[in-house]
Amino acid sequence: MELKGRTAFVTGPAKGMGRAISLMLAHEGADLVLAGRDLAPIEAVASEVEALGRKAVVVGCDVTDPDQVTRAFTTARVEFPDGVDILANVAGGTGPIGRSGVETTPEEFHDIMDLNVRGCFLTMRAALPGMMERRYGKIVNVGGTFGLRGRAGRLSYSASKWGLRGLTKSFALEVGAHNINVNCVCPGMVEGPRFEKVCADMAKRDGISIDEAKARHAADYALKRVSTDQDVANAVLFFASDRSRQITGQDLAVDGGWVI
């Protein structure tokens, strides 16, 4: 098991890639702190983690609230006195879809920047002192390919994921001397409810079937297939493990070859 004896703090662990990442980390031996706002689905993931023989602690946490982030990491230190070894920042939002920057309201822009950038800043800021003291840590931020390419109609989301890359690289430079790796996994389109909605909207707009819409998306990728939650979890595991010991400040696109 790659992560035996490690403790991971995961934000947004309840659904989709968050669930897949949580279970992957547990399968590889990590105990987990599962943090988010909607506790019922998180409790379900915690039960799955415990069925794998690992400890799971559920904490309510809005990552945009500094006080809640501080309390969540205080709970983590109580439950795991040896400290948090891995931080996986999965929690995030999409922002306005299909509207131009001019049509986006200041409130909409603020909200997605607050969640996707400031939320990750707060959790990293809370996790790093303990990691620096122990001279060990792995931080994995989940970005997106629209943070590697601009995207019309997704200005707020794209800007937030570009901002997250800046946080990743700057923190990597600041904490590398403490034996801490900070990296970013950038998923493209991922199979699941969000992808289904995108395809349904395309099908309605273009007068095609949903299957045809899915095929159009797949055709855009070098590998001619859409990523799965498990594909993303595999990349997060790599950055969370010591196999990536000499890699920091990097962006890894998990997108079937879209941003080549």
Image (cartoon, helix red, strand yellow):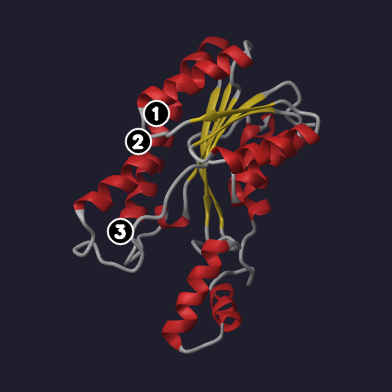
Q: Residues within 10 Å of mark 1 (few under 14, many from 20)?
A: some
Q: Nearer the viewer, residue 54 or 153?
A: 54
Q: Is residue 149 above or below residue 80?
A: below
Numbered disc 2: secondary structure: helix
Q: Nearer the viewer, residue 231 or 32?
A: 32
- Marker disc for residue 118: 2
Q: Residues within 10 Å of mark 3 (few under 14, many from 20)?
A: many
Cα–Cα gap, marks 2 and 3: 17 Å
Q: Residue type at mark 1?
A: Leu
Residue 169 in view (yes/no): no
Looking at the image, which residue is at 53% across and 41% down?
A: 12
Residue labelled with disc 3:
155
Residue labelled with disc 1:
122
Left-right relation of 65 to 31: left
Cα–Cα gap, marks 1 and 3: 23 Å
> Residue 155's x, y, as percent?
30, 58
Mark 1 or mark 3: whose residue is earlier in sequence: 1
> Residue 79's x, y, as percent?
62, 16
Mark 2 or mark 3: whose residue is earlier in sequence: 2
Q: Residue type at mark 3?
A: Leu
Of all residues shown, which one is farthest toward the bottom? 207
Q: Nearer the viewer, residue 110 or 88?
A: 110
Left-right relation of 101 to 97: left
Looking at the image, which residue is at 61% across and 37% down?
A: 239
Q: Are marks 1 and 2 in contact (CB under 8 Å)?
A: yes
Q: Is residue 243 above or below residue 150?
A: above
Q: Nearer the viewer, residue 49 or 170?
A: 49
> Residue 44's x, y, as percent?
67, 41
Q: For residue 247, what is the image quadrant?
A: top right
Q: Residue type at mark 2?
A: Arg
